[in-house]
Image: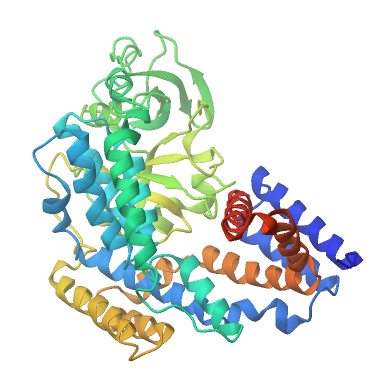
Amino acid sequence: MDPLHWQAWLTLGVLAAMAVALIREVVRPDLVFLVALGALLLAGTMPPEAAFAGFANPAIFTIGALFVVAAGVQRTGALSFLDRLLFGRSTRLSWALPRLMVPTAFFSAFLNNTPIVAMLTPRVQEWARRAGVPASKLLIPLSYAAIVGGMMTLVGTSTNIIVSGLLTDNGMAGFSMFDLTWIGAPSVVVVVAYLALVGHRLLPDRSKADEERSDGLTECLFELRVSEDAPFAGKTIDEAELRSLGGAFLIHVRREDHLVPATPDQVLLSGDELAFVGDASTVDVLLARPGLERIVAVKGVDDLETLPLYEAVVADSSELVGKSLRDTNFRDRYGGVVLGIHRRGERVESPLGRTPIKAGDLLLVEAQDGFDTRWNADREEFYLVAPRRTPRRTPRRTRRSASEPHKAPIALATVAAMFLLVALEVLPLVTATFAAAIIMVLSRCVTGTEARRSVNLQVLIIIAAALGIGQAFVRTGLADALAQGILAASASLGIFAVLVLLYLVTNVLTEI
């Protein structure tokens, strides 16, 4: 084997630096990939047309179109009938898990995994609560079912699409829609059987911990304001009975940009902003008390109305990261009011509106109906948005629901036609998915704005940039060196040993 050129070592160094940056979460993953691609391009490891070929790859447009198709299915509630399939009367996990996982795997073979898991997670949690089953033993199986289900068809996961595209680019025949089913379907059976019979026993049972800490958000920061007509204005904190709340405690009072100690004998005045830390369920209790109100009202909603409450987990690509709620003008930008912030492993005590948001923070948001549907389609802002409670009182004025259930048949027919055309090889995959996305928008199964938000640009940039980095890996001889190393270490042991070593190397690289 010829010695590696300096550009190969440089490429290896860039890959190592990229891995470190990803592990340490220095910046967003898509920026890490773009910087790595730019460094390799400047070093002359490949020409610009090779570096940016990934951005013109049909697979990128296919994946982007599938995001829109999935958003249309989610917005119309086309899979709402799944509840009858997924949840039965039996609470035995050996029976409940197959019933949950098999339909999830089936639909994940045809739709993007993320919206399916996002759509089913609140349903699974609610059923677990009603059935008295630990949700902690259901959610990982739900995720695994979606992952393994994506192995069954060409469009089940972006990886299959990318590999098929690379085969075509290298003059070989790509995969057809169901070529992978003979591998994927047995994998689904094995995974479902393992989790139903053995695997769920290894998952933690957090039901007792959940009971002890109510809803699990025991270190949530939330703020409320003393209204002008508060009956306890002019009384002390102790007299207002805001000192001992059971699940939460008052940590400080903000009065005209000055912090006032929350001592029992501190007198409360109208306009005081009260900061609490504790169980998030206390928010409902305090909002029901006369004299306490939101600091920021929801635009266009009467103050007497109480809106649904949602939990939103901030994504690392969100514009919120590193900024405060005040800096981002959250109410106008996202259409809701943040009542609390929960940060795992850390107590937040700084003012709610001035606290820099971190990726992974859980925000308690009060907003109009449809807030979860709208923002679950935008993976760049929130990993997941789930309803926490319904309104205590029915609002007198509500916007039109963000969902379009009467268009569910259109969405299902569009998806069915897309797969039929591809399976019968009437249209290429990219053409069929792109046409399906256009139909979803034109039929208003998903609005133009929601379609744009549903396309996860971060994922597309990572894939396109990774294809460019792969070109540097090939052109500098690193790919050949790695392949020859695998063959040298295992060829004498036969093809089975080659495959085992190839799988091990691929898994290690995938984890990084």
From what the image shows, is residue 402 above or below residue 425? above
Percent from the top left, x then y, of residue 305? Answer: 19, 44
Foreground residue, 402 or 385? Answer: 385
Foreground residue, 171 or 40? Answer: 171
**Corner quadrant of residue 377:** bottom left
Residue 131 in the figure: left or right of residue 458: left
The quadrant the N terminus occupies is bottom right
Residue found 20% across the figure and 73% down from its top: 412
Percent from the top left, x then y, of residue 441? Answer: 31, 80
Residue found 78% across the figure and 81% down from its top: 47
**Corner quadrant of residue 186:** bottom left
Q: Is residue 174 visible?
A: yes
Foreground residue, 437 or 97? Answer: 97
Residue found 26% across the figure and 76% down from its top: 415
From what the image shows, is residue 437 above or below residue 290? below
Foreground residue, 206 or 296? Answer: 206
